[in-house]
Image (cartoon, rainbow, N blue to C red):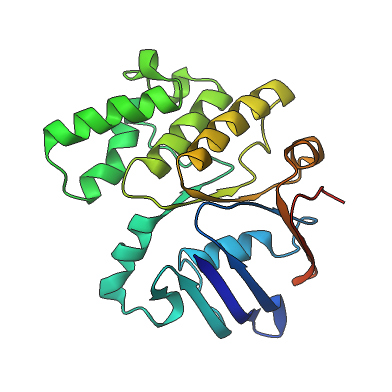
Amino acid sequence: MILFDNVSKRYGKSTAVEDINFKIDKGEFVFLVGSSGAGKTTILRLIDRELLPSSGSVFVSDLEVNKLPKSRVPFLRRKVGFVFQDFKLLNDRTVAENVAVSLEILDRQSADIDKRIREVLNIVLLTEKANFFPKQLSLGEQQRVAIGRAVAGETEILLADEPTGNLDPKTSWDILKIITEINKQGKTVIMASHNVDIVNSMKKRVIEISKGKIIRDQKKSKYS
């Protein structure tokens, strides 16, 4: 469960988001839509405590995110995986080693890590490229590595910030199929997207943001 209770985020005199209220249940798939600068990324960053709200409260499961002591932040990050538009892969590590990063942080045994890497690479369809480096991959393959890294650990929630923004239409659909399968496994997915075709075809819950405020929150909806 994710809950925003009257959440606002300000930077000096500028307001990024204002009076945001919503609840997302476990296992939901939700699109965040809106123009660039509307506040979509801010909402995602508030969920994983990369940002703290100026007012209001953010809850993830049983954790009140903005009141977590620093010592408890790693427990939140275990629940939340973040997929970035620019991938943020480690270029000096192979595909398998990039996926392993989140498992190493959890201090897993090496045998458990190897087993989970195989499972994750199968999910993101990269088994045959386990030993490739990011520069040897296409953009779509790099994004699949990023998704695999985000869900490799004990992740309950997947946040995806424009994961298809730099990809061609076919590759975008391939990425969406993988994210959809991850959602079917019980993980909550919140995806910020400008892709009208994808949002309209999926008919999932849509939360529309404009100038930092929610102007629409509808089940089984479209981009506009």
Residue 211 quadrant: bottom right
Residue 18 quadrant: bottom right
Tell me the residue at 64%/71% (across/down): 22
Q: Is residue 94 visible?
A: no
Q: Nearer the viewer, residue 5 or 107?
A: 5
The mark total stands at: 0
Tell me the residue at 31%/79% (across/down): 69
Residue 132 quadrant: top left
181 sits left or right of 103 in the view:
right
Q: Nearer the viewer, residue 183 or 94?
A: 183
Whole-percent x, y for residue 130 in the image: 33, 20
Tell me the residue at 54%/31% (across/down): 178
Q: Is residue 103 above or below residue 24?
A: above
Q: Is residue 99 visible?
A: yes
Whole-percent x, y for residue 1 in the image: 49, 65
Q: Is residue 166 above or below residue 219?
A: above
Pick out the residue farthest to the top.
128
Tell me the residue at 29%/24% (across/down): 118
Whole-percent x, y for residue 24 in the image: 58, 63
180 sits left or right of 59 in the view:
right
40 sits left or right of 121 in the view:
right
81 sits left or right of 179 in the view:
left
Whole-percent x, y for residue 220 in the image: 75, 49
